[in-house]
Amino acid sequence: MQAIVLHGPNDLRFDPEYPDPTPAPGEVLLKLTYSSICQTDIEMWQHGMFSAGGTPRILGHEAAGIVAELGEGVTSLRVGDRVAVENVRTCGTCFFCRKGTSQLCENGRNFGFSDNGGLAEYGVWPAALCIKLPSNVTNEEAPLAEPTSVAVHAVMNSNVHIGDIAAVIGCGVVGLITLQVLQAAGARVIAIDPREQSLKIAKDLGASAVLNPNKVDVAELLPQITEGLRNGLDLSRALSPGLGETESQRRRSQPSEHPTNATNAEIRDPGAIARPVKNGGDSEPSDSVTSATRTPNGPDVIIETAGAPGTALNAAQWTRRGGKAVIVGFSHQSQENNFGRAHMGEKTVMGSSATGTGEYHKAVALIASGKVNVKPLISALVPLDRGIPDGFQRMLKPEKDVYRILVGNG
Ligand SMILES: [Zn+2]
Ligand SMILES: [Zn+2]
């Protein structure tokens, strides 16, 4: 069969004659339809991240397929069923699995990481981890259930409440899905990203406000916009607090577009989100100040998905006192915070990795319901034999104009 095989750092090969797999007891053979290329695949290819001890394996952890053959003992699926692949295979018996925190499993295996993945004509995986697709979820949308499950896990970890104001730092695929999952959970969301194309999609997907750190001082504006949303003011007024208006005047003001929502800007500096903070929520205590001088409060929840230098720190700094920052992106660069002042603001900062038990099903259900729209994130369809030049190589371009490229023979 055709397969895209990672042999080591910088050594990715198309193999037209890779041996066909056979399902073990409890597994199914899948005729794979599409797998999407994720930034993590690029990291594995370029930097040797998550190397499987030097063993070559087929990449593709965001995958979907059609059941072609049942392994011994499989009764939950039938040949011909369309499925999304839940890529995390936990042991069920370790300390963390027994506690119900299987995402922390010590013996976890992963489709497309430790085990052969979806960038091939066929694959094998436990039937229990093949999630049957509702008829209205297409083969093209199905691989995006994986990043959706990552977003669901992050939002569950955020403990966001109905009516909360949230911000998403980074509007790539995971960020733009996280925005929608937060909205499905009842939050209003401010999207932050230096790419105008991403901010436009964020607006189309319902973001209450968008901020481009190449154009505005996010540290200064974010708390003002947050308070504006919290108080039900229109955003143009929220940007200019203290104008002396009465409440009734404020209520009468017509909504107008946020001035930072400009279009056609270039991607000048993807790391620019990480500008030094001026009005970070962990500055001086301000309980006793008057309303005229008090610093507005930042978002209740910030989910960081950019993985750019400084963005995890920004998430911690920009969330309100008592708020929560959830870190999903990863960066090679270290980000320092003053833990000598960690008591200030009683903030919670937590990491969120992959997905938890049952959350893949939630992801598929969110796509089926239309609450998560992944269609704007599908940039191209590429056959397997063109996957490296038209998929992986294209993802390397510094100003890439793509979100997910789907690779497969359909
Ligand atoms: Zn991924
Ligand atoms: Zn385990």
Image (cartoon, helix red, strand yellow):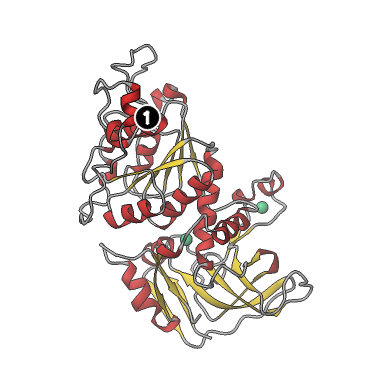
Compared with residue 68, is residue 189 higher up or lower down, i.e. above or below? above
Q: What residue type is labelled 1?
A: Glu
Can the viewer see residue 58? Answer: no
Compared with residue 318, is residue 17 higher up or lower down, i.e. above or below? below
* Residue 229 locus on image (x, y percent): 39, 34
* Residue 146 locus on image (x, y percent): 53, 61
| Image quadrant assignment for residue 215 | top left
Please state the total of marks drawn on the protein image: 1
Q: Which residue is drawn at 39% across and 15% down?
A: 287
| Image quadrant assignment for residue 232 | top left
Compared with residue 236, is residue 24 higher up or lower down, i.e. above or below? below
Q: Residue at x 27, y 50 (%)?
A: 194
* Residue 93 locus on image (x, y percent): 72, 52
Q: Would the CB of label 1 be found within 8 Å of ligand 1?
A: no
The kind of secondary structure element at disc 1 is: helix
* Residue on which disc 1 sits: 227
Q: Which of 125 and 17 is in front in this view?
A: 125
Can the viewer see residue 64? Answer: yes
| Image quadrant assignment for residue 208 | top left
Circle 1 crowding by C-alpha within 10 Å: few under 14, some 14–19, many from 20: many
Q: Nearer the viewer, residue 54 or 134?
A: 134
Q: Indicate left or right for 74 with 12 as reference.
A: right
Q: Residue at x 42, y 42 (%)?
A: 189
* Residue 342 locus on image (x, y percent): 42, 26
Q: Residue at x 26, y 44 (%)?
A: 213
